[in-house]
Image (cartoon, rainbow, N blue to C red):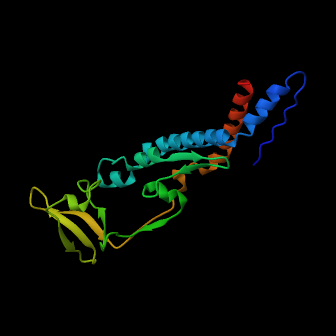
Amino acid sequence: MSLSIKIDVTGSAPAQAARLRGVLLDRIGMNERVGRDALALVQAHGKTVTAVSHKSAESLGANPTGHLEQAYEAVQQTNDATSASLLVPRASRLRAAFGSYTLTPKNGKKFLTIPASADAYGHRAGEFADLFPIRTKANHLLLCRLDSTGNLQPMFALVPSATIPEDRGLMPFDEFPAQAMRSIEAYTIEAILNL
């Protein structure tokens, strides 16, 4: 997609035309506008997504942690004379917008801990002093505790890795080209009006 603007200068406006030419050749300013508007688009999209995207919390009967909202808020824009870019936090759920990925344990650990109850959701296993491991008949490993009535409460499933599927709906990819064109058009119109 390309944008072509033709401006015919007549009369006694060559000085204004020269100033306009300078403004339109200022790619840093234009790219800053494109990046700023793209960031606003992503954050507005994020508000729509996060309003309905709490599957993990809902499945456990837990309160959402706000992790996804924080990830959208952490997106940043940067630009230079050749481009505008959005910087998306890699260690966040937004990573799935760019393809599936596999999580593996870090720092010498053997397992990931996946919350298995509302009490565990949004917490790390290390925050609980009363957890103990059990192995199920199906050979699954769990970290459990005894609840206040003495019943066994599964808190975390222990898994060697977890594959997170791609979710392109996390980013408004299809809207970026049209938004960039609107940004360039608005930048150009503002430049002309401010001569």
Q: In this view, does 187 lie to the left or right of 4?
A: left
| Residue at the image point whose x is 52% and y is 56% from the top | 97
* In front of the other: 22 or 122: 22
The answer to whether 19 is drawn above or below residue 153 in the figure is above
**116 versus 48 height, above or below:** below
**Residue for point 48% across, 58% down:** 95
6 sits to left or right of 28 = right
Say which quarter of the image contains residue 112. Answer: bottom left
Q: Which residue lies furthest to the top in this view?
A: 12
- Total tally of numbered discs in the picture: 0
The quarter holding residue 37 reads top right
Residue 96 vs 138, above or below: the answer is: above
Along the line of sight, which residue is nearer the eye, 114 or 127?
127
Residue at image point 19% right, 71% down:
133
- Image location of residue 52, percent across then percent down: 43, 45
From the image, which quarter does the C terminus lie in?
top right
